């Protein structure tokens, strides 16, 4: 059965922690969705054809609308499908405040643990991540830092254990929400290692019980996977959805031509026209698109406007 232009397509790969964050949110909301599996490293020709060069995973596609960044994707799911709110525990503000810790400090610590000895990766992966970061991705340096990384990981895990100390079921209370998804995906990332990092979890019983509760939420209804070619065809055949009102910006307005540079070192500058703007996000119609008219929606913090 053909996938319709209003159906959810999550461009992902299975052991992507940030894809897992969105999958947990889909589980909380019990939504139906299709996966479009993408490689973990470049080249990703079908994905970058859709996104104007953006290469990170996950990306949410709904017809000719593409949404970047895991928390921003979750916010869009909430806007479109408010039932079973994914912000029922702590609200969107708290989820946004937690993100720099869960997606930054905690994630970086887990990466150091995994790639410093838990995983063995090939030269192609090392080259890809070095080019993405604009500096060497160095497992040897991570291995040398393993003692400190272990201390840091246990400090983060202890913080979570303390948070669960009053008997609450989830991190913000009795209901699962986006904060649980953001933290759970990093614990799941640890589980995908080869075991050394995973042993650190055993000393945190409340965290383990919480992990089981989040896992039981599932991932919603995963329908048939979309092929990469099918996702491109869906975007080409669709039109962008009507835009909701924006909140304005002192810096840029709808109709302005812009150049937006993602923070990734090896991602091209996006050139296009702003069609919606608010204090936290932009929607841009790319100047050049291989798939017809599309709208790219993203939080401003994933890059910056640059001068011609």
Image (cartoon, rainbow, N blue to C red):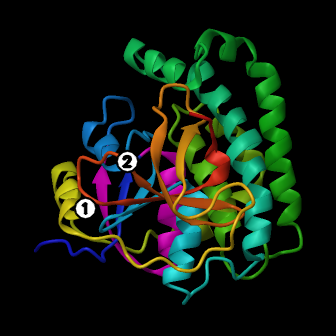
Q: Nearer the viewer, mark 2 or mark 1?
A: 2
Q: Residue pushed farthest bottom? A: 83
Q: At 59% across and 13% down in the image, what residue appears?
A: 136
- The answer to whether residue 226 is visible is no
> Tag 1, which secondary structure?
helix
Most foreground residue, 51 or 69: 51
Q: At 62% across and 20% down in the image, what residue appears?
A: 116
Q: Position of residue 14 (x, y in %)?
A: 39, 48
Q: At 31% across and 50% down in the image, what residue appears?
A: 50
On the rendered structure, is 114 left or right of 96? Answer: left
Which portion, as a residue range, is magenta?
15-38
Residue 142 in which image quadrant: top right
Residue that mark 2 sits on: 287
Residue 198, above or below 61: above
Residue 5 colored in magenta in the image: no
Q: Position of residue 111 (x, y in %)?
A: 63, 31
């Amino acid at each position: 059965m053909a996938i319709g232009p209003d159906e959810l397509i999550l461009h992902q790969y299975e052991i992507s922690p940030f894809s897992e964050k969105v999958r947990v949110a889909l589980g909380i909301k019990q939504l139906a969705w299709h996966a479009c599996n993408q490689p973990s490293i470049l080249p990703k020709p079908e994905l970058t054809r859709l996104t104007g060069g953006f290469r990170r995973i996950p990306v949410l596609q709904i017809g000719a609308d593409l949404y970047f960044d895991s928390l921003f994707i979750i916010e869009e799911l909430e806007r479109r499908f408010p039932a079973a709110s994914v912000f029922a525990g702590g609200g969107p503000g708290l989820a946004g405040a937690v993100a720099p810790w869960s997606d930054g400090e905690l994630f970086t610590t887990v990466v150091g643990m995994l790639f410093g000895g838990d995983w063995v990766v090939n030269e192609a992966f090392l080259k890809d991540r070095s080019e993405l970061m604009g500096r060497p991705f160095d497992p040897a340096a991570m291995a040398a830092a393993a003692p400190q990384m272990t201390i840091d990981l246990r400090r983060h895990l202890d913080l979570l254990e303390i948070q669960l100390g009053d008997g609450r079921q989830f991190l913000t209370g009795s209901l699962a929400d986006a904060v649980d998804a953001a933290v759970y995906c990093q614990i799941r990332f640890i589980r995908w290692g080869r075991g050394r990092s995973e042993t650190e979890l055993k000393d945190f019983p409340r965290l383990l019980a919480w992990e089981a509760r989040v896992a039981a939420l599932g991932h919603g209804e995963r329908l048939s996977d979309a092929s990469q070619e099918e996702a491109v065809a869906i975007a080409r055949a669709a039109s962008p959805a009507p835009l909701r009102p924006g909140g304005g910006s002192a810096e840029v307005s709808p109709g302005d031509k812009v150049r937006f540079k993602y923070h990734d070192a090896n991602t091209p500058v996006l050139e296009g026209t702003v069609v919606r703007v608010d204090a936290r996000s932009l929607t841009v119609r790319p100047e050049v698109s291989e798939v017809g008219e599309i709208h790219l929606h993203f939080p401003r913090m994933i890059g910056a406007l640059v001068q011609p």
